[in-house]
């Protein structure tokens, strides 16, 4: 009996090859676009987490701060909640480090009459205190201490990056919603066309005692199959695109800084299951309307 | 003498109207188990409409129809298949699915009832052998003659061993030889215990078979 339903579903798909191919391609494209956003979020969030984990605050000291002040400050900073380490970087060490980093262009620094860099503390945070809120709170606490000129922790660009991700997230949700509706509509339409082409056959089936369940079941299988195949093709397309893009990224930028990962198996399974569900719902809607009439 | 309670099909003051036109007018009739009954009358007398009411192809305008204790006026759409499984219907225009083979057309009845594939294979082959169509089981209906299509329609009607067989002009467009073959099939089905109801205007067919004859004219029962 079950085999019969599968055979009929397969026969339906083969009989309406063109229509079903168009539907599968539409589902695949929708899945490709929606999962591209998912892939972007996953990697962007991972990147953001990595940056946040490595985050450190640079505390610039007032030029008037003497050795005793610095010792006091180091002690006071280390006493603050969430601080893992406060390392002193003298203005001389900072300039030497800058020279090393500038490499061949270090000659530009030769003309300096005096060292413009201030003394500073590099403050590292405990792993459990690396949220933006913790960093902001700590920054304010440090700024309140005496002889502190400025505290920097790259708050502006992290904030901007987070905003960009949020905008993309919103666009992703909106696009996902739109594509979901469009895919539903197309699947429903395909099934409706198949149903109309089989109107006479379905009427005869009913006359010989076929139940609606008997008529519907192969269409449900068909909807699930179209959704599943479309989902898998979409995910495969995304993987191929990801592979080439990540290869290029790997060659052109620091691999450590921007290591990209593909979606994990759970998300892939969820996306394919989602597209199967869309296929099924499309069938359900069409069948409900058709069999009612 | 049989009473109303013994009737397998019971029509009680049945009316069918299409707008102001009365297609059937106050029909009351009892059809008993294993009866062979002809619904006779000219074209437009209401024979096909009456058969359609019996398989819920049309809904009643007024009155009651009971089939095997099922009140058709109260049969919900969900229970319609249950009623139709009690019936084997032979349509005037055969109503075979052109994209399915002879075998698939007949097997559909049993598939819809959830029968196993081995049983279906055995049963369908046996019925096709009975109607003389076993060698054409892989053919598609458009490739068959009118007589052959009618034989397939008969096979489909009887494969589910229904209690009642409804036949609408079963020999209508057939040559004499094919018509006789179909009539033999119907009498065989009757001999196996089925109640057979044949709507026809073919007097020759009526006289060639033993059975009760009900005359319809302009939607009314006249004899």
Image (cartoon, coloured by chain):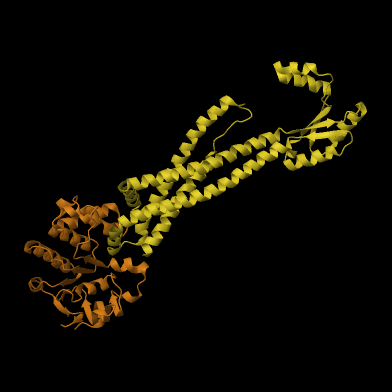
Chain colours: A yellow, B orange
Number of marks in the rendered image: 0
Front residue (pair A129, A152): A152
**Which residue lies at the image location 40% right of the left edge and 61% below the top edge?**
A289
Image coords of residue A252 (percent x, y): 58, 25
Is A189 on the left-hand or right-hand side of B34?
Answer: right
Front residue (pair A145, B206): A145
Image coords of residue A2 (percent x, y): 35, 52
Front residue (pair B48, B64): B48
Q: Against A278, is A143 above or below?
A: above
Q: Is residue A20 visible?
A: yes
**Which residue lies at the image location 78% right of the left edge and 16% below the top edge?**
A110
Q: Against B38, is A289 above or below?
A: above
Q: Against B172, is B104 above or below?
A: above
Q: Is residue B71 visible?
A: no
Front residue (pair A47, B159): A47
**Which residue lies at the image location 60% right of the left edge and 45% below the top edge?**
A169
Is A264 on the left-hand or right-hand side of A137?
Answer: left
Residue A121 figure quarter: top right
Image coords of residue A8 (percent x, y): 32, 51
Q: Quadrant of the N terminus of chain B?
A: bottom left
**Which residue lies at the image location 69% right of the left edge and 36% below the top edge?**
A157
Image coords of residue A35 (percent x, y): 52, 42
């Amino acid at each position: 009996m079950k085999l019969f339903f599968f055979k009929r579903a397969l026969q339906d798909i083969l009989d309406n090859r063109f229509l079903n191919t168009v539907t599968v391609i539409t589902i695949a494209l929708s899945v490709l676009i929606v999962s591209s956003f998912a892939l972007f979020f996953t990697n962007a969030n991972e990147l953001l987490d990595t940056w946040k984990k490595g985050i450190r605050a640079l505390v610039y000291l007032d030029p008037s701060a003497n050795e005793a002040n610095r010792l006091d400050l180091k002690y006071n900073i280390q006493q603050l909640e969430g601080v893992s380490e406060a390392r002193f970087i003298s203005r001389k060490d900072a300039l030497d480090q800058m020279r090393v980093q500038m490499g061949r262009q270090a000659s530009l620094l030769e003309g300096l009459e005096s060292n413009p860099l201030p003394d500073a503390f590099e403050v590292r945070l405990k792993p459990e205190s690396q949220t933006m809120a913790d960093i902001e709170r700590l920054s304010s606490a440090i700024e309140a201490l005496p002889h502190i000129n400025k505290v920097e922790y790259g708050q502006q660009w992290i904030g901007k990056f987070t905003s960009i991700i949020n905008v993309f997230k919103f666009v992703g949700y909106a696009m996902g919603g739109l594509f979901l509706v469009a895919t539903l509509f197309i699947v429903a339409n395909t099934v409706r066309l198949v149903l109309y082409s089989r109107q006479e056959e379905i009427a005869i089936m009913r006359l010989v005692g076929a139940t609606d369940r008997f008529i519907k079941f192969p269409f449900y299988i068909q909807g699930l199959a179209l959704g599943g195949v479309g989902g898998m093709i979409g995910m495969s397309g995304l993987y191929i695109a990801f592979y080439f893009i990540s290869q290029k990224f790997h060659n052109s930028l620091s691999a450590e800084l921007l290591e990209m990962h593909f979606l994990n198996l759970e998300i892939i399974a969820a996306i394919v299951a989602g597209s199967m569900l869309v296929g099924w719902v499309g069938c359900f809607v069409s069948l409900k309307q058709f069999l009612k009439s | 003498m049989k009473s109303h309670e013994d009737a397998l099909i019971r029509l009680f003051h049945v009316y069918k109207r299409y707008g102001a036109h009365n297609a059937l007018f106050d029909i009351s009739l009892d059809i008993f188990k294993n009866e062979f009954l002809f619904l006779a009358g000219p074209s437009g007398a209401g024979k096909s409409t009456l058969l359609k009411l019996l398989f819920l192809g049309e809904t009643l305008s007024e009155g009651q129809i009971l089939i095997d204790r099922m009140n058709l006026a109260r049969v919900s759409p969900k229970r319609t298949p249950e009623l139709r499984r009690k019936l084997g219907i032979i349509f005037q225009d055969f109503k075979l699915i052109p994209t399915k083979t002879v075998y698939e057309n007949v097997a559909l009845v049993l598939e819809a009832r959830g029968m196993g594939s081995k049983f279906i294979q055995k049963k369908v082959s046996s019925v096709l052998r009975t109607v003389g169509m076993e060698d054409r089981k892989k053919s598609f209906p458009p490739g068959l003659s009118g007589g052959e299509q009618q034989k397939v329609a008969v096979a489909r009607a009887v494969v589910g061993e229904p209690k009642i067989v409804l036949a609408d002009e079963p020999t209508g467009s057939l040559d004499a030889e094919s018509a006789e073959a179909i009539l033999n099939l119907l009498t065989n089905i009757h001999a196996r215990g089925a109640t057979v109801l044949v709507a026809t205007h073919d007097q020759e067919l009526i006289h060639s078979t033993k059975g009760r004859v009900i005359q319809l004219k302009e939607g009314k029962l006249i004899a």
